[in-house]
Image (tube, helix red, strand yellow):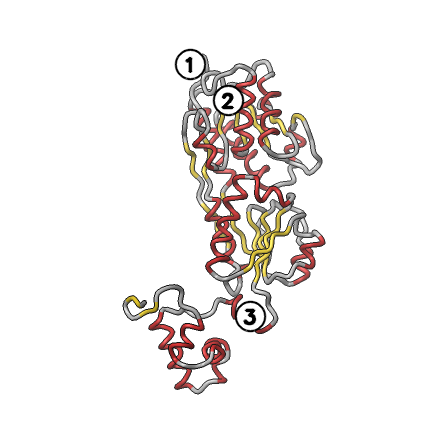
Amino acid sequence: METDGRPAGRVTLATVAGALGVSRATVSNAYNHPERLSPRLRDQVLATARELGYAGPHPLAATLSRGRVNALGLVYEDPMSFAFSDPAAVLFLQGVSEVCEREDLALVLISGGPNSAVARVALVDAVICYCDVPIEGSLAAIVDRGLPFVVVDGPRLPGAGHVGIDDRRGAAAAARHLLDLGHTHLGVLAMPLVDDAWEGTADLDRQDRARYRASRERLLGYREAVEAAGLRWSAVPVEERSPYGRDAGRRAAAALLARRPRPTALLAMSDELALGAMAAATDAGLAVPGDVSVVGFDDVPAAADAHPALTTVRQPHREKGRRAAALLLRPDPGRDEHRLPVELVVRDSSGPPPWR
């Protein structure tokens, strides 16, 4: 079946070859080796391709004849189970998968970080590093192989494409929201700052040594808003638990809510931590937001479904995955940087302090 003279469904190199009655190699040569065709035949191939809506081969697909495997690698610093259990990671993975499906690319999941043994030998053409690599961190396995790569959420690195958000701006908006409501006693639930399985309060020295970019930037955002309101950042307790997840948020919040004076509002660096904090408030017999307000970061689906619905900072996880994968289809992804927007979403988990 055809629509406006074009075949229905996806138009491929084989579609053009069939329409002309030539081989797929002939169509491929029109794009990749024009010297192998007469000018007349090449013009005919390109004209037919335009009529059918075929834009030509993507850079990765065009390299198959030169030994490429037509696969993207997706590197996680966390165990592979994280990719399928953390809501934000799941959304990101969906975005990457959408591009891979559209472009007929395989997707290879690699756990253990960019310097793992698997990262050194995985059969892939390019790599997405979905890991908050430390500022002094090493991507030696990827760099040594000469593979194109994109860093997501980590620091901007020479030679690599980058996709991320303005973590500091989002965190500052979350803190300002609580300060504008009248809260002056805040507490922070932190994602890991240093890779040492720490359980306890993160003092100023530990905050200064934060190894991970997202954690460091979100702390700075909170701090900027607090100090701009005339409050002392050193008076804001920051609790850190490991491993990262909802239970870590529950335990960190329990410690904060046991303080005297008790914080009237909690800033969580992720929705998973925030949802754990809401559970801790229930454990302590406290109402959210009547006794304590809670604000997260991410806006995963569970945030809107929580009771009460969670106030949080929205970031476009699925679009982040799409952008990262799409960058690797370009000839030189290392030149590209995409900073996606964040937005404070106010729901029912935040309100004025109890005395107001």
- Which residue is denoted by mark 2 in the rendering? 265
- The tag earlier along the polypeptide, 3 or 1, is 3
Residue 236's quadrant in the figure?
top right
- Which residue is denoted by mark 1 in the rendering? 356
Q: Is residue 10 above or below residue 29?
A: above
Q: Which of the two discs, 3 and 1, sits closer to the camera?
A: 3
The residue nearer to you, when weighing 188 against 60, is 60
Left or right relative to 243: residue 321 = left
Kindly identify the residue that appears in the image at 62 percent across and 47 percent down: 76
Total tally of numbered discs in the picture: 3
Q: Position of residue 274 (x, y in %)?
A: 53, 29
Q: Are marks 2 and 1 in contact (CB under 8 Å)?
A: no
Q: Secondary structure at mark 3?
A: loop
Mark 2 surroundings within 10 Å by alpha-carbon count, few (fewer than 14), some (14 through 19), many (20 or more): many
Q: Secondary structure at mark 1?
A: loop
The residue nearer to you, when weighing 268 against 231, is 268
On the rendered image, what quadrant is the C terminus found in? Answer: top left
The residue nearer to you, when weighing 272 against 171, is 272
Give me the C-alpha separation between circle 3 and circle 1.
Answer: 65 Å
Kindly identify the residue that appears in the image at 56 percent across and 56 percent down: 107
Q: Position of residue 304 (x, y in %)?
A: 43, 32
Q: Secondary structure at mark 2?
A: strand
Left or right relative to 351: residue 259 = right
Left or right relative to 205: residue 216 = left
Q: Position of residue 348 (x, y in %)?
A: 41, 25
Left or right relative to 126: residue 317 = left
What's the residue type where badge 3 is placed? Thr
- Which residue is denoted by mark 3 in the rendering? 63
